[in-house]
Amino acid sequence: METKTQSLRERWAELKESNPHLRIRNAAEKLGVSEAELLASQVGEKLPNGEIAVIRLKPEFQTILGRIEELGKVMGLTRNDAVVHERKGVYLNPSLNSPAIGLFVGEDIDLRIFFSCWKSAFAVNEPTGEKSRKSIQFFAGDGEAIHKVYLTSESNNHAFELLVNEFRSENQNTSEEVSPDHQSETELPDHEIDIENFRNEWINLKDTHDFFAMLKKYKVTRTQALRLAPAGSYAVKVPNDSIRTICQLASEKKLPIMVFVGNKGMIQIHTGEIHKLLDHEGWFNVLDPDFNLHVKMAAIVQSWIVRKPTADGMVTALECFDKDGQQIVQLFGKRKPGIPELEEWREIAKSVE
């Protein structure tokens, strides 16, 4: 195993030499391993400044997350293959007592956490000139990154060191055991679905959170549900550059929106206005001081405007999907329970249909 680790560490070093700006997720893909395996290969390695590159932490995820507030203002990063969501803020109002589901509900850091797939955690020091970029990173059993917390210039570095020392694992192995994630959805043929009752239940929804349970009840995938939606404008297929159009209009009108990005272990939400938008090398970006979004436009294969009835009136979303039918990003107008959706948001959504 040591030979394999040494080999992986050396191969990554060679790759970084020829591609100094290559991100670890892309490096792992090129080397044919998971990101967690690649990161683990650097456990214990000393950086030129004397710091340790990677330290394994105890897999006490809820406890560690409950202490992140001590770090002050940090940057939380959640991504999937197509979209990266970065939000700066303080980790406030945690709800982490359940072994399966956790929450942070703050104006800046707003997270929905699904712990069943979480497996490992690392403290990471990435060299960036004289200093290093410090983070705590969490991974699933298949080695995919779930969530990363990066220190900023406003973070408490001393609190970070205390946290790492307290949760440092006795296991500092340089290899990581991963197991493939085989949880792919099997789509039933349309004729096996109770379409009439499915549509009636959609029309009579009272809460957007009931939508997922409804999909499970009728055994439909999300994209199948949109195809089989009730007549009218409950689900309208729209161009795949609609996310750019909607963001541009929201920016121009200074309309606050909600941006949801997730993977199997985390959903991260930004609520607020967006301002600086930029297209660069196939990526559409929001580049604001406390919120960055990066969308790989070619990865969007389906886009839909989706409407769900609630006790507060209709709620409208843009939902974007990849080639496997996985939802990669979701946009809403800013709203809270008990308050109807903003009419300006509805007009923006309607404009791409």
Image (cartoon, rainbow, N blue to C red):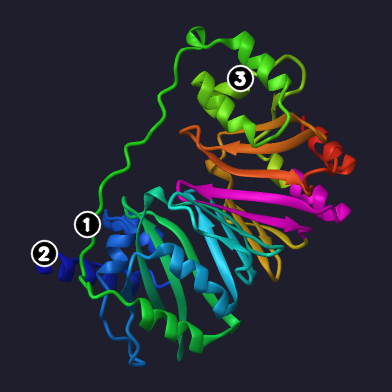
- Place of residue 257 in the rendered image (x, y in percent of width and height, measured from the top left): 76, 51
Task: Identify residue type, mark 3.
Answer: Arg
Residue drawn 32% across the image and 61% down it: 36
Quadrant of the snapshot with the C terminus: top right
Quarter-wise, where is residue 3 in the image?
bottom left
Task: Identify residue type, mark 2.
Answer: Met
Q: CA distance from mark 1 to mark 3?
A: 40 Å
Tell us which disc is closer to us: 2 or 1.
1
Q: Which residues are the magenta region?
A: 245-274
**Which label's residue is closer to the chain start, 1 or 3?**
1
Task: Point out which mark residue 227 bears.
Answer: 3
Viewer-proximal residue, 99 or 107?
99
Task: Identify residue type, mark 1.
Answer: Glu
Residue drawn 69% across the image and 38% down it: 318
Crowdedness of circle 3 by 10 Å Cα count: few (<14), some, many (20+)? some
Q: CA distance from mark 3 to mark 2?
A: 49 Å
The residue wearing badge 2 is 1
The residue wearing badge 1 is 177
Crowdedness of circle 2 by 10 Å Cα count: few (<14), some, many (20+)? few
